[in-house]
Image (spheres, rainbow, N blue to C red):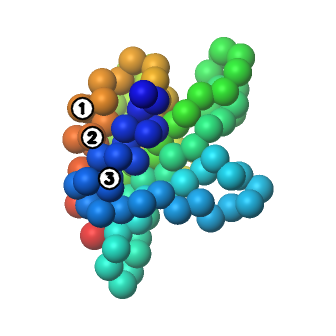
């Protein structure tokens, strides 16, 4: 099972959150947001050209953007699977290349962190 689907399943079970597809131009981009009145996003998941992420590979990949404390963003980005956030604040968000070596349990922990940071 793709990690993107595992993230959707985890968010549904942990936070009663379903993916929302907001953009007709980008039908594979989904957000996960809090169910409260403020409805802040805690994740963005999509499929993108690897070159747009700065990777030197051809083809597309799934990615997730998550919020993290700035000190952790810089530490995590020392790994090749953690990148500056695509299309979001690069100080507080990071991009993880899915299905590319990051353990699913680690992604779940970071998703939990992002959820807590965006309440």
Mark 1 vs mark 3: give the one in front: 3
Which residue is at 35% across, 69% downward?
34
Which residue is at 26% across, 61% downward?
15
Residue 21 sits in quarter: bottom right
Residue furthest bottom as drawn: 37
How packed mark 2 is, by other alpha carbons closer than 10 Å (few <14, some 14-19, many 20 or more), is: some
Which residue is at 62% across, 64% downward?
22
Label 2 and label 1: CA atoms lie apart by: 5 Å
Disc 2 target residue: 108
Residue 41: percent from left, percent from top: 43, 64
Disc 3 target residue: 11
Mark 3 vs mark 2: give the one in front: 3
Disc 1 target residue: 105
Q: Quadrant of the N terminus?
A: top left
Asked whether the beta carbons under mark 3 and mark 2 sit within 8 Å of each other, the answer is no
Residue 106: percent from left, percent from top: 25, 32
């Amino acid at each position: 099972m793709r990690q993107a689907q595992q993230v959707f399943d985890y968010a549904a079970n942990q936070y009663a959150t379903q993916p929302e597809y907001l953009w007709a131009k980008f039908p594979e981009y989904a957000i996960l947001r809090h169910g409260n009145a403020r409805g802040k996003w805690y994740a963005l998941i999509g499929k993108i050209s690897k070159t747009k992420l700065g990777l030197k590979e051809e083809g597309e990949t799934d990615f997730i953007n998550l919020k993290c404390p700035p000190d952790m963003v810089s530490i995590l980005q020392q790994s090749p699977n953690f990148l500056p956030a695509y299309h979001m604040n690069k100080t507080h968000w990071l991009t993880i290349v899915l299905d590319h070596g990051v353990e699913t349990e680690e992604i779940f922990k970071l998703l939990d962190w992002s959820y807590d940071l965006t309440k």
